[in-house]
Image: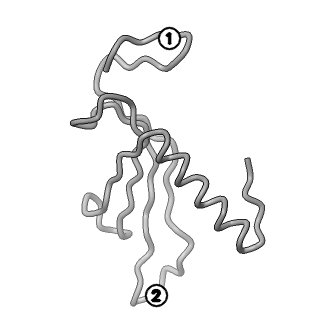
Amino acid sequence: MGSCNPAAEPCFTRAVKKSIDFDLDDHPHDDEERPRTAWAVSIVDDCDGCDDLRIELTLEEEGRKGEGVVAHLAPATARRLRGAIAAALRDIGEDAGA
């Protein structure tokens, strides 16, 4: 990463992973055909090949820690995903929130 201005942005001086939120999806836990999915959102600056901070989205089947899919999203991609979730909420008649 390049130089950092603490007044304008967070500064990380070593590899950092900051957990933002995590939970399980709302699928019934007793469905034998489709397991519930655990999700987690973090901020990372240790993405090999990424020159800046990334939003890390992890999805994995409940009980299968370390076997899921991890996406390193640039800010623009994270905003696009946020917009897609907001659009889906509106489409089902729900408030998309802030």
84 vs 92, left or right, is left
Which residue appears at 66% of the width and 63% of the height? 87
Say few, some or many: other residues with alpha carbon within 10 Å of mark 1 (under 14 / 14 to 19 / 20 or more): few
Say few, some or many: other residues with alpha carbon within 10 Å of mark 2 (under 14 / 14 to 19 / 20 or more): few
Q: Nearer the viewer, mark 2 or mark 1?
A: 1
Give percent across and percent down for residue 52. Answer: 36, 29
Q: Residue furthest left?
A: 48
Q: Secondary structure at mark 1?
A: loop
The picture quadrant where one finds residue 33 is bottom left
Q: Which residue in the protein does label 2 denote? A: 31
The picture quadrant where one finds residue 19 is top left
Q: How many marks?
A: 2
The three-letter amino acid code for the residue at tag 1 is: Pro
Which residue appears at 43% of the width and 37% of the height? 43
Q: Are marks 2 and 1 in contact (CB under 8 Å)?
A: no
Give percent across and percent down for residue 90. Answer: 73, 66
Q: Which residue in the protein does label 1 denote? A: 6
Q: Is residue 31 above or below residue 21?
A: below
Q: Mark 2 or 1 closer to N-term?
A: 1
The three-letter amino acid code for the residue at tag 2 is: Asp
Give percent across and percent down for residue 74. Answer: 42, 40
Which residue appears at 41% of the width and 51% of the height? 57
Quarter that holds the N terminus = top left
Label 2 to label 1, Cα distance in Å? 48 Å
Nearer the observer, 70 or 79: 79
